[in-house]
Amino acid sequence: MGATDTVGRVAASMGLAGSAELEFRPSADIPNAGVLLSLPALLAVGLLRGTEQKFELPKGFYRLTSIFLLLAFMALARLKSIESLRYCAPGEWGKLLGLDRIPEVRTLRQKVWALSCGDQPTQWSAELCRDWMAAAPENATAFYVDGHVRVYHGEKATLPHHYVARQKLCLRATVEYWVNAMDGQPFFFVHKDIDPKLISVLERDIVPRLLLEVPNQPDAAELEGDKFLHRFTVIFDREGYSPDLLLRMKKLRVACLTYHKHPQEDWHLEEFMVQQVKLASGEVVEMKLAERGVCLTNKLWVREIRRLTQSGHQTSILATDFKTDMGRIAAAMFARWSQENFFKYMRQNFELDRLIEYDVEAIPDPKTPVVNPEYRKLDAQIRRAQGGLNRTLVQLASLKLPAQASTRESDAFAEKKAALDEVILYLEDGIEKLKINRKQTPKHIPLDQLPEGQRFTRLSTRAKHLVDTIKMVAYRAETAMAHVLREKLSRPDDARTLLRAIYNAEADLVPDQKNKTLTVRLHHLANHSLDDAVRHLCQEINSTETKFPDTDLRMVYELVS
């Protein structure tokens, strides 16, 4: 339905013609046409940068740029999946791209699959990351690193179990480690089918890549001249706490910020002083901070900075950055919420956890270390036995003999105490034997040594990497537009809510071939104040003089008069 260029489609399917020529026609009241206001921002953050060199589609009716624009517009319009296009008017969406209609779901899936072949999505994502860092080097000095668990509810793949903090359950899932700027904007992510934990991913995947890609790092002479100078900073939570990791990172001249996993007794209240701390958002707050130098178990000296809260709790931070003042370090550490908010927002608005494809494949490296099922079984037995021992010890401690007990009461007390002592000895002996067996059992074994029915498989990630990169571009474009809107909003936090309303608003398209313009006339929003903010946004994006890709039409944005 919606197809009008039937001759062009037949010719393209027979190889007699190339991709369709984009043609915009005057149209009124197009649903979701407000998403066209995101076009300048999408192009500015790199949606189509390098795509012609990295990707190639088989000859057909739809061109490469149309597919990328469609996927980005879908993400911003909050279409949950490719399948959701089944319930959208294809002709109306086609008008936004200069086509008679958008591809059907099956066709679009085939296009995404073709674009995902090979290593092109990974290379494209890496190039975008380098461009983002080079464009804003001030945001490429400190990086938040955290894992995101993607729960799997299907039946095809055999995935390992991971603890999901937001659900407080251990579920089948895969793990991605994301690297974000201090304002929460994403740089890249590392996918792991079998989670080797944060420390391993930091050392093997993330830090080596940052050493190659972070711009404006000090050279060897500068590092030699200042022993406290570092290349950049990585910030992570207690999962990455390791004195040995901090030492190895220090040798690479990479500063680390993390929470102290084993803080000692509270410091004296007299040590804490009120500091004016500027957050990443620009807000200035007061914090009670104190600092000491501490020596870790591996003889590494680090800075320990503590924050005293109103409840009297002292939060301990460890830092190997000896040049930044403690206020800025505290601001950087406590702003980790920006990455948590990013994960939550991407799950709720961009369907970060949704499956893109349902194919299952074998894990490429059969020597990938996994937890030994026998070790896990012994460990669970020890935990159960230890729990039983603790309960029995509590029962023994609660036994009391009255001061003036009768002979019968004394005998009953002695009999019960003897029975509990016997149970305790039995449990302690069993726990000791289990611990000996666990010590003799390797904790990790290669994947191919697992029993046949217990071997893990993985979900195909080719299309997911491409689509997730487009979602990162869409998020960055939305963030840039939100910054513009906040200049006119009385409540800056409403900027993203307003953008969602804009993306789903109706608009008119007015092409002018004589003046080479394509005017997008957005319909009015809920009130005058929102209209004023939208006019300000239109003025800003009109100044970019963006042309619609593959055409000579300059985009013009305005509200319906």
Image (cartoon, grey):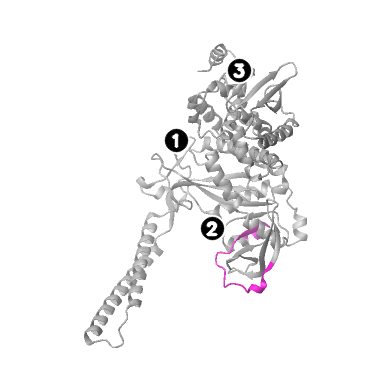
Q: Report the residue at 60% width, 17% height from top.
A: 18
Indicate which label's residue lies in the foreground, 2 or 1: 2
Q: Magenta part of the protein: which range?
A: 248-273
Mark 1, residue position: 359
| Magenta-span inclusion, residue 250 | yes
Which image quarter is the C terminus in? Answer: top right
For label 2, the SS is helix
Residue farthest toward the left in the current orientation of the protein: 408
Residue drawn at (44%, 43%) of the image? 152
Q: What element carries label 3?
A: loop
What is the x, y in percent for residue 389? 35, 70
Residue at 74 percent of width and 16 percent of height: 514
Toward which corner of the image does residue 431 lie, by quadrant?
A: bottom left
Residue 292 part of the magenta segment: no
Q: Find residue 442 and report its image quarter.
A: bottom left
User: Measuring 53% from the left and 27% from the top, which residue is drawn there?
Assistant: 111
Report the residue marked by disc 2. 239
Residue furthest front as drawn: 528
* Mark 3–mark 2 distance (CA, rounded to whole Å): 52 Å
Q: Residues within 10 Å of mark 1 (few under 14, many from 20)?
A: few
Which residue is more in the foreground, 33 or 361? Answer: 33
Task: Residue under label 3, please give it.
Answer: 20
- Spatial CA distance of label 2 from label 1 is 32 Å
* Dot 2 or dot 1, earlier in sequence: 2
Disc 3 residue type?
Answer: Ala
Q: How many numbered discs, if any? A: 3
Q: Is residue 240 left or right of residue 512?
A: left
Labelled pair 3, 2 in contact (Cβ < 8 Å)? no
